[in-house]
Image (cartoon, rainbow, N blue to C red):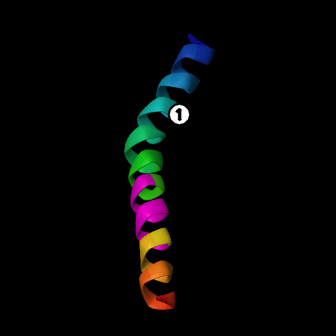
């Protein structure tokens, strides 16, 4: 139950807190600097 809980916490804190900033950061950071550079 220890590894399951740890994985559950990482998965719960990963997709919502990890995917959001990751997907929003990657496209935004990539599109922002590119738009500014262009």
| Picture quarter with the N terminus | top right
What range is drawn magenta here? 23-29
Residue 38 at x, y percent in the picture: 47, 88
Which residue sits furthest right? Answer: 3
- Residue 30 in the magenta stretch? The answer is no
Is 2 in front, or is 26?
A: 26
| SS state under label 1 | helix
Which residue is drawn at the image coordinates 39% and 60% (left, top)?
24
Callout 1: few (<14), some (14-19), or many (20+) C-alpha neighbours within 10 Å?
few
Residue 22 location (% of width, % of height)? 48, 54
**Relative height, residue 36 to residue 14 (above, below):** below
Q: On screen, 27 above or below 18?
A: below
Q: Is residue 3 left or right of residue 14?
A: right
Label 1, on which residue?
A: 10
Q: What residue is rendered at 47% in x and 31% in y?
A: 11
Report the number of numbered marks: 1
Residue 4 percent across, percent down from the top left: 55, 15
Quarter of image, res 6 = top right
In this rendering, the answer to whether 8 lies above or below 34 is above
Query: Residue 37 at x, y = what percent?
Result: 51, 89
Q: Is residue 4 left or right of residue 21?
A: right
**At x 45% / y 40%, what residue is drawn?**
13
26 or 12, nearer to the observer: 26
């Amino acid at each position: 139950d220890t590894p399951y809980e740890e994985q559950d916490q990482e998965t719960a804190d990963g997709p919502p807190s990890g995917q959001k900033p990751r997907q929003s950061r990657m496209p935004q950071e990539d599109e922002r600097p590119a738009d500014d550079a262009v």
